[in-house]
């Protein structure tokens, strides 16, 4: 990489392609200091988030470099119940 500092925003519709490309380049995940994965309330979104986290783990990203952001949280709802995996 030629850039010293950058924030790379990969939209939800592009995350699969992005992860597939990272798999093709061994060690590419080491170019990133952190992976921030936002999630929102909703079964499909939570399943997608879990899939993204599993994919990051599969390419060798340590959990210490991953942060999950719970987005659009209703402060009146219990966070654990709101974001419990529902299939």
Image (tube, helix red, strand yellow):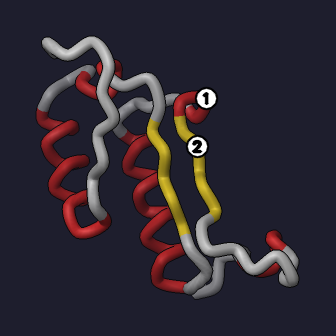
Q: Are marks 2 and 1 in contact (CB under 8 Å)?
A: no
Residue occupying image coordinates x 30% and y 20%: 31
Task: State how many labels appear.
Answer: 2
Instruction: Give the vertical position of 69 relative to 71 (above or below).
Output: above
In what quadrant of the picture does the N terminus appear?
A: top left
Residue occupying image coordinates x 30% and y 27%: 6
Which residue lies under the disc numbered 2?
67
Of 57 and 75, nearer the camera is 75
Front disc: 2 or 1:
2
Q: CA distance from mark 2 to mark 1?
A: 8 Å
Instruction: Give the vertical position of 18 relative to 24 (above or below).
Output: below
Instruction: Give the vertical position of 81 relative to 19 (above or below).
Output: below
Q: What numbered label is drawn on residue 64?
A: 1
Residue occupying image coordinates x 20% and y 16%: 3
Of 62 and 34, nearer the camera is 34
For label 1, the SS is: helix
In what quadrant of the picture does the C terminus appear?
A: bottom right
Q: Position of residue 20 (x, y in %)?
A: 18, 48
Q: Position of residue 83 (x, y in %)?
A: 70, 74
Q: What numbered label is drawn on residue 84?
A: none
Is disc 1 surrounded by few (<14), some (14 to 19) or many (20+) residues within 10 Å? Answer: few
Instruction: Give the vertical position of 30 relative to 74 (above or below).
Output: above
Q: Position of residue 81 (x, y in %)?
A: 81, 79
For label 2, the SS is: strand
Is disc 2 surrounded by few (<14), some (14 to 19) or many (20+) residues within 10 Å? Answer: few
Q: Is residue 53 left or right of residue 74?
A: left
Of 6 and 53, nearer the camera is 6
Residue occupying image coordinates x 84% and y 82%: 77
Q: Quadrant of residue 14?
A: bottom left
């Amino acid at each position: 990489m030629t850039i010293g500092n950058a924030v790379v925003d990969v939209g939800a519709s592009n995350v699969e392609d992005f992860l597939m490309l990272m798999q093709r380049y061994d060690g590419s995940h080491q170019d990133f200091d952190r992976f921030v994965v936002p999630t929102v309330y909703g079964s499909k979104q939570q399943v997608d988030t879990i899939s993204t986290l599993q994919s990051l783990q599969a390419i060798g990203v340590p959990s210490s470099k991953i942060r999950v952001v719970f987005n659009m949280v209703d402060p009146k709802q219990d966070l654990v119940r709101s974001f419990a995996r529902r299939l």
